[in-house]
Image (tube, coloured by chain):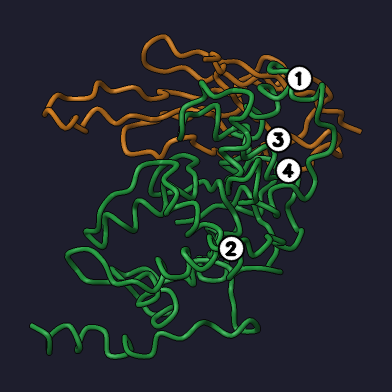
Amino acid sequence: MRVWLLLLFPLAAAAAEIPLAERKSGYEFMSRETRAMQDDEVTGPAVLTLLDGEALWGKLGCGTCHTDMKGVAARYPAMVDGKLTTLEQQVRHRNPNLAYESRELLALTAYVARQSRGMPIDVKPVQPNLDAGKAFFFRRQGQLNLACANCHDDNWGKKLGGTPIPQAHPTGYPVYRLEWQSVGSITRRLRNCLTGMRAELLPHGAPELVDLELYLMWRARGMKMEAPAVRP
Amino acid sequence: MTDLMARVVVNVPAEAKKGEVIEIRTLAGHPMETGFRRTQLGELVPRDIIRSLVCAYNGVEVFRAELHPAIAANPLLTFTTVATESGTLEFRWTGDNGFSVTEKAVIKVV
């Protein structure tokens, strides 16, 4: 069994971080057609969500306090009142009845995140959360005994089930994912990975996932925001 | 919490030359539930799709599409027509469960 796993993951021992200059957005691994969907600012699939977000922004009166949300999404997760908080959680601060992964919360989050498009990711390396997130990324877990790093650091660019393995830079969340046929959050994506690894499925808002999100954003620091992106 | 309305987006050039072939892009927000999927309890999820899109240019039908299961959610339909005269393009999507949305776009032909 051990030999078989070693054959599957011959580079598993390497487990090195990707040099900053070699980082690529998931966009670069996509087909021409999927890129065209993301680049279509008028009739791209995420446009519907952005329009919903704009309507909700007005309806809920967010504009009474907030004027310019430019660059905000590029700074999350961030410390808010002594707690590491994701953009979604911060959007919920006045509307805690918005459920995670609800159409409303995703629409508002996407509307806010859109205003940071093209700006460099600029999260603060909050400790001890960053180290905890990094440890999570490198820790083998689940029935397949895989760490995030086994795919996204060591084997990116190769294929898994016919599709390229990206480097896992969260530049475009919330994303419109073709597999989902809808917009979803980074937490939904991380939970997908946990399911694939047959690891413990952590709930939305779990501190472990917030720490991991911070590490992923830190890992992608300086890369350009693309939210809401399109992914296959 | 809030009831989000059905959304459609159409993209028509605001101005075109007479006789020019113009591209029209339409996007409709819709789940396009195929009717073949089952819930975890084994119950069939009823079909809920857009059945047709019709585009009329100053009252004359210039494009019609029939949609079927296995077309992706939020269908984007792109087609072309010839800019003949200034006026209005009217789009109508109809589908299961009484789905009916119309949208208009104005074009100026010079």
Q: Amino acid type of disc 4?
A: Val
- State the SS at label 2: loop
| Residue A148 to residue B27: above or below | below
Tell us which disc is closer to us: 1 or 3: 3
Residue A32 seen in render: no
Distance of mark 3 from mark 4, alpha carbons?
A: 14 Å
Chain label for disc 1? B
Could you tell me how far apart the alpha carbons at marks 3 and 2 are, in whole angstroms? Answer: 48 Å
Q: Position of residue A94 (x, y in %)?
A: 64, 24
Q: Quadrant of residue B32?
A: top left
Please name the amino acid that badge 2 sits on.
Gln
Q: Nearer the viewer, residue A108 or A33?
A: A108
**Label 1 SS:** strand
Residue at point 51% right, 68% down? A131
Residue under label 4, please give it. B21
Q: Colour of chain A?
A: green
Please give the residue where the numbered disc 1 appears in the rendered image.
Answer: B88
Whole-Å distance between the Cαs marked 1 and 3? Answer: 13 Å
